[in-house]
Amino acid sequence: MDNKRYLEVLTPQNSQIIFIDQQPQMAFGVQSIDRQTLKNNVVGLAKAAKVFNIPTTITTVETESFSGHTYPELLAVFPENKILERTSMNSWDDQNVRDALAKNNRKKVVVSGLWTEVCNVTFALSAALEGGYEIYMVADASGGTSVDAHKYAMDRMIQAGIVPVTWQQVLLEWQRDWARRDTYDAVLDIVKEHSGAYGMGADYAYTMVHKVPERVKHGERIGPNPANK
């Protein structure tokens, strides 16, 4: 393995992304992360990919017979994307997936999928071994059927040279420099909506320090009006 290639940071020019089986029945089985947090992270990552024009593949398994339809919040980010349906748990076994990845001509593949210990690990190992791809596994936009299942699948992939990342790390690595004004506002919008305490801090700094108007309209603030004691 050429370790030097992993010293390269992710950029909008060298990356592509694949979402694997982000479907409700798959999410029902996830026990390694809160499922609402999982979906928040997946959608935040998807919005980041959209902002930076990252080539995006969405693939699903047994949609009609078992897994259900991909999260509507994810599909809303990519309304024009084809959805590549499979029967195999390993996305690499599907020629449409291989063709989609090859068409993008980028060796660094960011992966968000369910479940970590099945569909993610088999795809990651196969795509790295047979396709020569460099896999970046988004740990908090993926989930396993138990904490151990997720952890040991991540460990197995790391031992094989797969790079563990988190969704916000990917977002900020793509942004890299706050002087890049063409994506600055869109990135901060994602942060405010999906980044928890970081997003709250950004809202606070904008409105209280920089005196920017609040980002939502709301009813009139009334009071205080102390009651008679």
Image (cartoon, rainbow, N blue to C red):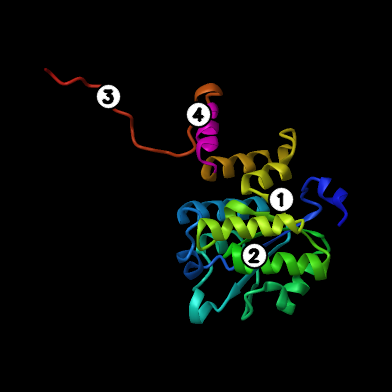
Numbered badge on residue 52: 1
- What is the number of the mark on residue 120? 2
Picture layout, residue 128 above or below residue 220: below
Furthest residue in direction top, as rendered? 229
Going 51% across and 68% down the picture, which residue do you hit? 26
Q: Earlier in the sequence, mark 3 or mark 2?
A: 2
Pick whichever, 63 or 155, lies toward us.
155
Q: Secondary structure at mark 1?
A: loop
The residue singled out by tag 3 in the image is: 223
Disc 2 marks a residue whose amino acid type is Asn
Of helix, strand and loop, which one carries label 3? loop
**Where residue 228 sits: x, y (%)?**
12, 18
Q: Residues within 10 Å of mark 4 (few under 14, many from 20)?
A: some
Front position in the image: 229 or 22:
22
* Three-letter amino acid code of the residue under disc 1: Phe
Q: Nearer the viewer, mark 1 or mark 3?
A: 1
- The answer to whether residue 24 is magenta is no
**Disc 3 and disc 2: Cα gap in Å?**
53 Å
Where 34 sits versus 105, above or below?
above
- Depth order, front residue of 157/164: 157
For residue 125, say whether it is visible: yes
Residue reaching furthest to the left = 229
Please give the range of residues in magenta: 195-206
Q: Choose the circle earlier in sequence order: 1 or 2.
A: 1
